[in-house]
Amino acid sequence: MAIIGTYECKIDAKGRVLVPASLKKQLPGIVDGFVLKRSVFEHCLELWPMAEWEKMMSKIGKLNPFDKKNDAFIRRFMAGVKNVDIDDAGRLLIAKDLIDFAQISKDLVFSSKVNIMEIWDKKMYEATLEEDDFDFGELAQDVMSNISFDE
């Protein structure tokens, strides 16, 4: 199930973020909880619904841990991983080490990424979207041109 939208929020001094109601309605398995982790490619966080996380762990669990590259990948992929819940007040608690990694100040953005959410510092998110040397049209062509839309 795809999650849709971009949501601006504020984080308090204790690392709590009030999850917007319209986002909360879309999040699957809210009672099962979530996994919050560092992004692989960017200085942002990823919020994984537990069912999606379990699918990924099933795939990663098939990697041979005695292969040095696999071992290094697993270690870095799992760095900073936290189980999190949305509390009864609708808040998500982000741990200090993850706040530091994503360089989150006061304003942040939840941004959909198909079946997970990215959590960005607002200024860093906007800067990423405004990169001058980035050609989204070229990227879209490279990524999407070989996909069949006949289904």
Image (cartoon, rainbow, N blue to C red):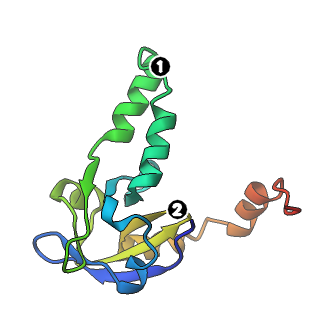
Relative placement, left or right, of 45 versus 95 is right
Q: x%, y% of residue 16?
A: 18, 73
Contact flag, marks 1 and 2 (Cβ < 8 Å)? no
Q: x%, y% of residue 149?
A: 85, 63
In which quadrant of the rendered view does residue 95 lie?
bottom left
Q: x%, y% of residue 54?
A: 43, 45
Quick one: label 1 or label 2, which is nearer the N terminus? 1
Relative placement, left or right, of 36 versus 40 is left
Say above or below: 24 vs 146. below
Secondary structure of the residue carrying tag 2 is: loop
Residue denoted by label 1: 64
Residue 36, label in figure: none
Relative placement, left or right, of 81 versus 95 is right
Q: What amino acid is at disc 1?
A: Asn
Secondary structure of the residue carrying tag 1 is: loop
Q: Residue at x 19, y 76 (%)?
A: 88
Q: Residue at x 45, y 76 (%)?
A: 126
Residue denoted by label 2: 115
In which quadrant of the rendered view does residue 43 lie?
bottom left
Q: Nearer the viewer, residue 135 or 34?
A: 34
Say above or below: 130 vs 116. below
